[in-house]
Each structure stands twice: as C-alpha cells, then as structure tokens.
Image: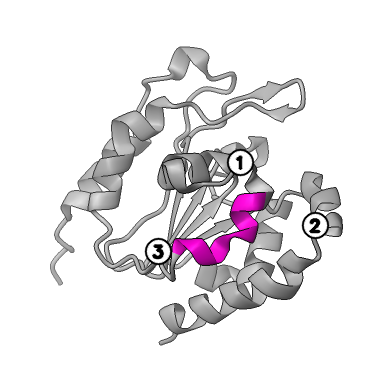
Amino acid sequence: MSKRTRTPLDVLLTEIRACRACEAELPLGPRPVVRAHRDARILIVGQAPGARVHASGIPWDDASGKRLRDWLDVDADTFYDETRFAIVPMGFCYPGRGASGDNPPRSECAQLWLDRLLAGLPSIRLTLLIGQYAQRHFLRDTRKATLTDTVHAWRDYGTGVLPLPHPSPRNQAWFKHHPWFDAEIVPELRRRVAPLIAG
C-alpha cells in the first residue's frame, strides 16, 4: 500500500507547526494549533488558543469549544473531522494573559501564514468569524461599530460568512442581554452547517 502523497497544504501545515517566529514573546513557548484539509467546506476562524488548548494541542478543547459545538449541533468527531471543518485561529499560539483575560492574538501569524493557508482551502463554502479579531481582519470596512452590531447585521454578509461572538463562558452576560442570538442566529448557523457536513 503506497503512502499518501503530501499536498502543498500538508507541507504548509508542517511549516506552520514548526514556526518559532514569536518564541521570545510567548510565555509558554510556541505550539501552533491549527487544523485544515483541502476538502474542508467550513472554515472556523477564532482568536488564539487558550492555556488549556495550548496544553492539549487540540483546538476548542475547552468550555468555549463545547458551546461552539452546541451551536453547530455537531459532536466532537464531526467537529474534529478536518475534511469538514478547517480550524484556523488568528493567532496560532497561546499569547499569554493580560489584565482582563488572554492577550490578543499575535499579528505575526496572519502576516506570515493566513493568505497561504486560505489559498490551500479551495472547498470552503462557509466562514465562521468568531470574535472581533477575525471579524476585523476578514470584514475590514464592512464590519459595524461593535461586535454586537456586526453579529446582529449577519444578513449583510451573504450566505458564505457568518460573524459570531466568542462562545466563552466569560461572555455569559452578553448572551443573557442578547437573546436574539440564540433565537435567530444559532438556528441560521445550524441551517447553513448541516448540508455542508452531510455525508
């Protein structure tokens, strides 16, 4: 039986996982966390791994990931199937903690890798932009004044993009004060995701 031929995306992912560009700035050292396959139809763009994800090396391996999978109405096996979901944070390594939570994702990842990585994902049909950093990068001038306004204006971004808040437990108050998210956007998210992961 022959070994599978490595694709350009496989080579790129190996390069990303070996990246040490920010090593001196990372409190726990580099451990890029990213998953992708050229057949993936859904792209999840988040912020950066937290400390728990840094330890496990598994993206969304925390309470935020559990809530995200609930929103998507998928189990862990489906979520971690790289031929269905590409999981690409704006920053690939844990950036450390700041005064009010984790630091922002480091900008070097997007500068060094993001365009090349996206070019290797030709099958993407739906991009989920989770949190302000992903929305700022991808939506640019079309994003609204606040994350809440951007998420609420989801119809403005067509059927291929859906801006979402971060599913962190730290955002519990946001979900409580914006019940329209669970009532309106979660069902829309599930409606868009289901046919893309079928089969």
Residue drawn at x 64%, y 61% is 68
Residue marked by disc 1:
145
Residue type at tag 3: Glu
Q: Nearer the viewer, mark 2 or mark 1?
A: 1
Label 2 SS: helix
Say whether disc 2 or disc 1 marks the residue closer to the N-terminus: 1
User: Which residue range is magenta in the image?
Assistant: 149-157
Say whether disc 2 or disc 3 marks the residue closer to the N-terminus: 3
Residue marked by disc 2:
175
Residue drawn at x 53%, y 31% is 105
Q: Position of residue 26 (x, y in %)?
A: 53, 20
Mark 3–mark 1 Cα distance, whole angstroms, equals 33 Å
- Would residue 129 appear left or right of 168 to someone viewing this image? left
Residue type at tag 1: Ala
The quarter of the picture where residue 67 lies is bottom right
User: Looking at the image, do the residues carrying marks 3 and 1 touch, with CB atoms under 8 Å apart?
Assistant: no
In front: 3, or 185?
185
Q: Nearer the viewer, mark 2 or mark 3?
A: 2
Q: Position of residue 35 (x, y in %)?
A: 41, 53
Residue 115: say if magenta. no
Residue marked by disc 3:
82
